[in-house]
């Protein structure tokens, strides 16, 4: 089986989990995002075909919703919470340290495809501010001087 | 057991559960909220299971372990509660578990080092309900949080769950609406619209299809009560929605949850499935002939989707842009049908109001704002977390009595309420009672209940810039004042924080604020000026310090500050020099160090690592 048809099957498996209704579009795109770490163009075309909605509509959703990305993301995602409580407790310094150490700008991916650095508006864990989430693992009370060691320790780099 | 087919069967089932329950049985409750899980509560729960299994061979103590939702005291997590003694242990590590099992569960003694210690009197407070953070609270919306297992519907039913629904199903829909109206309940999502009025308007519209929806798109940064409720007591939301649906005549509900809350999505999904199995959702609920079901819709990480019309567009599978609301969504909402949309906390209050009556609920709170409100007390305060208190409590009581005062003994400067739509209220107005109307009058708003405490180290211009930047990112771009006005405001604020501001900047800011307030299409835009307006109103001198003296009094705005090392305090430990990414700190061991300000990028690492507080900002 070629890679292309394998991917098609993966798209279909996700699409088949949902009702054939426009209500399901966002959830399907989010599942694409989760599985492929971005929303691939072929996925959009497949979804458009199956659901009978224009691909342009799906692109509009892809660019509107923050949870979706149309470009490939890194193997690991680091989300720095920049909610108000985190901002007051130094999230900017955490973010700048990560930008400097990983040599990547916010919302960008490192050249080796290892890390994507994102900002997120409040993850609702304000009591532990400032919060950084590495691949779904929450870290509270993070500090600029410790953040890189923490990331390395978790991803085993 | 399978489906429950009548109210009598529900009560019989509850009695059955109560008879089987052993209230004196030692129980360990481990918090599984997002915060405590981040601090490792899963490992703690595993350690308990392990230790109990081991000990179980020698001692015959039967212990149940429960994983609960968020207690709201996340800063001190992982939290463990022991029942029936009602002991709360803070910051429990897996290593502590054998000692807890040995001392407390088997020996009935308290492990003192894990107990809350009063910050002033130094007294130990082992009991959960006596800790100042909890003692002053009155929990209605949060009534089950931390005491039940949210993934177990029996726990909810045993705690009195679905009794409100059972009572509602014996009432006329019209009477339910009156009850909610008389209770004075106002929407907990922000604007504070009277819930009963909303229901009545929806029920009045002639239509064969109606929807009830729950807004769980908790977007205000700094507020997390909705997350806590959806994670920790999902059935309370579901029960409230069924009651609302019955009252307005709806058969389909939707819960819109933020994608950033994976645990809430999971627990709600499980709860909906469990409710269906028990016949509490679906066809012919409790044999009443009434049918209703709920779907979950995951948000896509867009702040504007918390706005009602944008939220509905998003659920329909579109880009979540708001529309002009000449016609309210109670008339034409989701799929152009009459729709009731209430916030998570509002729904969670409904079963209790029906069960205990409107008078009970209306006996709490203030003239215009009844009942209790959950606040998320965060920022520069000693005890951070979720707090539920009667409306009308003063800001000072909240910050000082429950919050335990300002972190590190610093000076209390302001609180920010209402998220990006709200404003900052200065310390001198801290005796203001918190309710919907007084906050609006002070130039802020209730919002979803985020109370962000600021101290002397917080720069108010930076705060205004922060919120404006947030809103620039989150503006959907549909209307011009919001799309183009906000970036101009951000430019002006940035210039002020970089020392390039003039008096004209302030005048222009105020003009743009006015334009947004009157010209924007939706609530995001019309309230977007509040953070700027309220900081100019109460902290004008701080703006002027940035503009005239080119100084940031709080020491935050990078362009206006320099880092230096106090030679008196520096011990020459070399820690800062070793960690400086610019290698611009020099000095011999055991001698005071110096920062080369020409190379310094003001990253703050030296200040962070210094254990002698020798790195200062001027």
Image (tube, rainbow, N blue to C red):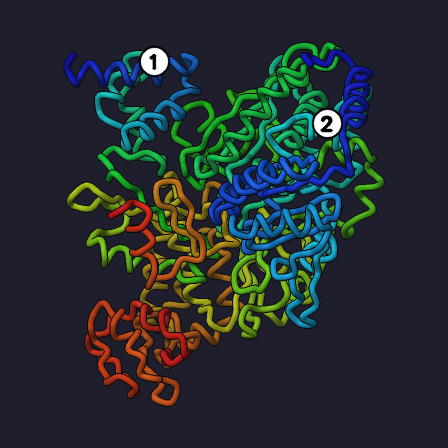
Residue at 67% x, 14% y is: B279
Q: CA distance from mark 2 to mark 1?
A: 41 Å
Q: Measuring from the top left, give residue B236's x and y in whole percent.
A: 67, 32
For mark 2, what is the residue? B157
Q: Measuring from the top left, give residue B333's x and y in whole percent.
A: 55, 26
Residue toward you, A133 or B111? B111
Q: Is residue A50 above or below residue B116?
A: above
Q: Quadrant of the N terminus of chain B?
A: top right
Please determine if labels 2 and 1 lie on a single subunit. no
Q: 10 Å neighbourhood of mark 2: few (<14), some, or many (≥20)?
A: some
Res B331 → quadrant? top right
Residue at 43% x, 13% y is: A19
Residue farthest along the front direction in this orientation: B58
Q: Measuring from the top left, give residue B71's x and y in whole percent.
A: 62, 46
Comparing labels 2 and 1, the label whose residue is closer to the camera: 2
Q: Quadrant of the C terminus of chain B?
A: bottom left
Q: Is residue B567 left or right of residue B396?
A: left
Q: Is residue A55 left or right of residue B333?
A: left
Q: Is residue B467 left or right of residue B452?
A: left
For mark 1, what is the residue? A51
Q: Is residue B533 above or below residue B8?
A: below
Instruction: Determine if residue B229 is in view.
Output: no
Q: Are marks 2 and 1 in contact (CB under 8 Å)?
A: no
Residue at 58% x, 20% y is: B273
Residue toward you, A7 or B489? A7
| Count of numbered marks | 2
């Amino acid at each position: 089986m070629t890679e292309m048809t394998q991917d098609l099957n993966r798209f279909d498996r996700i699409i088949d989990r949902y009702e054939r209704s426009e209500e399901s579009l966002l959830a399907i795109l989010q599942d694409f995002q989760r599985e492929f770490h971005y929303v691939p163009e072929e996925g959009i075309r497949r979804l458009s075909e199956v659901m009978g909605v224009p691909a342009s509509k799906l692109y509009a959703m892809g660019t509107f919703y923050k949870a979706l990305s149309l470009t490939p993301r890194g193997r690991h995602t680091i989300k720095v919470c920049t909610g108000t409580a985190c901002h007051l407790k130094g999230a900017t310094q955490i973010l700048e340290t990560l930008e400097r150490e990983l040599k990547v700008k916010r919302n960008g991916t490192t050249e080796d495809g290892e890390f994507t650095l994102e900002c997120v508006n409040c993850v609702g864990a304000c009591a532990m501010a400032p919060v950084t989430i590495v691949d779904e693992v929450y870290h509270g009370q993070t500090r600029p001087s410790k953040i890189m060691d923490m990331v390395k320790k978790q991803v085993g780099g | 057991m399978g489906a429950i087919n009548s109210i009598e069967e529900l009560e019989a089932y509850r009695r059955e559960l109560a008879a089987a329950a052993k209230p004196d049985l030692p129980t360990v409750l481990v918090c599984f909220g997002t915060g405590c899980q981040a601090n490792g509560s899963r490992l703690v729960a595993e350690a308990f299971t392990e230790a109990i299994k081991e000990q179980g061979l020698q001692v015959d103590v039967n212990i149940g372990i429960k994983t609960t939702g968020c207690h709201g005291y996340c800063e001190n997590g992982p939290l463990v509660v022991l029942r029936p003694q009602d002991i709360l242990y803070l910051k429990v590590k897996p290593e502590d578990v054998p000692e807890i099992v040995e001392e407390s569960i088997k020996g009935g003694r308290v492990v003192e080092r894990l107990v809350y210690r009063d910050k002033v009197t130094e007294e130990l407070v082992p009991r959960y309900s006596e800790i100042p953070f909890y003692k002053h609270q009155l929990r209605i919306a949060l009534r089950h949080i931390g005491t039940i297992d949210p993934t177990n519907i029996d726990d909810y039913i045993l705690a009195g769950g679905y009794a409100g629904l059972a009572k509602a199903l014996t009432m006329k829909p019209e009477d339910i609406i009156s009850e909610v109206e008389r209770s004075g309940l106002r929407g907990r999502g922000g604007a504070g619209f009277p819930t009963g009025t909303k229901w009545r308007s929806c029920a009045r519209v002639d239509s064969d299809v109606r929807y009830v929806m729950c807004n769980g798109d908790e977007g205000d940064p700094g507020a997390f009560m909705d997350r806590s409720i959806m994670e920790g007591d999902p059935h309370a939301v579901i029960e409230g929605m069924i009651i609302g649906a019955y009252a307005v005549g709806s058969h389909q509900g939707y819960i819109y949850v933020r994608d950033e809350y994976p645990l809430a999505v999971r627990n709600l999904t499980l709860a909906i499935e469990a409710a269906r199995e028990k016949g509490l959702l679906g066809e012919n609920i409790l044999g009443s002939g009434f049918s209703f079901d709920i779907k979950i819709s995951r948000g896509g990480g867009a702040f504007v989707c918390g706005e009602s019309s944008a939220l509905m567009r998003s659920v329909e599978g579109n880009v979540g842009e708001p529309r002009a609301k000449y016609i309210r969504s109670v008339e034409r909402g989701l799929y152009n049908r009459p729709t009731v949309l209430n916030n998570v906390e509002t729904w969670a209050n409904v079963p209790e109001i029906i069960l205990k009556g409107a008078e009970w609920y209306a006996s709490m709170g203030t003239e215009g704002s009844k009942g209790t409100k959950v606040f998320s007390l965060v920022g520069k305060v000693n005890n951070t977390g979720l707090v539920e208190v009667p409306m009308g409590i003063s800001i000072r009581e909240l910050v000082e009595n429950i919050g335990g005062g300002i972190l590190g003994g610093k000076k209390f400067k302001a609180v920010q309420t209402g998220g990006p739509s709200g404003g900052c209220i200065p310390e001198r107005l801290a005796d203001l009672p918190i309710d919907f109307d007084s906050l609006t009058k002070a130039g802020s708003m209730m919002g979803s209940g985020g109370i962000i405490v600021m101290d002397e180290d917080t720069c108010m211009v930076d705060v205004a810039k922060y919120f404006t930047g947030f809103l620039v990112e989150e503006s959907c771009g549909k209307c011009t004042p919001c799309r183009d006005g906000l970036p101009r405001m951000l430019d002006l604020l940035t210039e002020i924080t970089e020392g390039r501001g003039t008096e004209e900047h302030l005048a222009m800011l105020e003009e743009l604020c006015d334009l947004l307030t009157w010209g924007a299409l939706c609530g995001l835009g019309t309230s977007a000026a509040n953070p700027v307006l309220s900081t100019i109103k109460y902290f004008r001198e701080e703006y002027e310090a940035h503009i005239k003296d080119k100084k940031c009094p709080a020491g935050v705005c990078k362009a206006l500050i320099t880092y230096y090392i106090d030679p008196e305090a520096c011990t020459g430990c070399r820690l800062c020099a070793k960690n400086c990414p610019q290698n611009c700190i020099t000095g011999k061991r055991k001698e005071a160090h110096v920062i080369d300000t020409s190379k310094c990028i003001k990253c703050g690492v030296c200040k962070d690592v210094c254990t002698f507080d020798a790195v200062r900002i001027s």
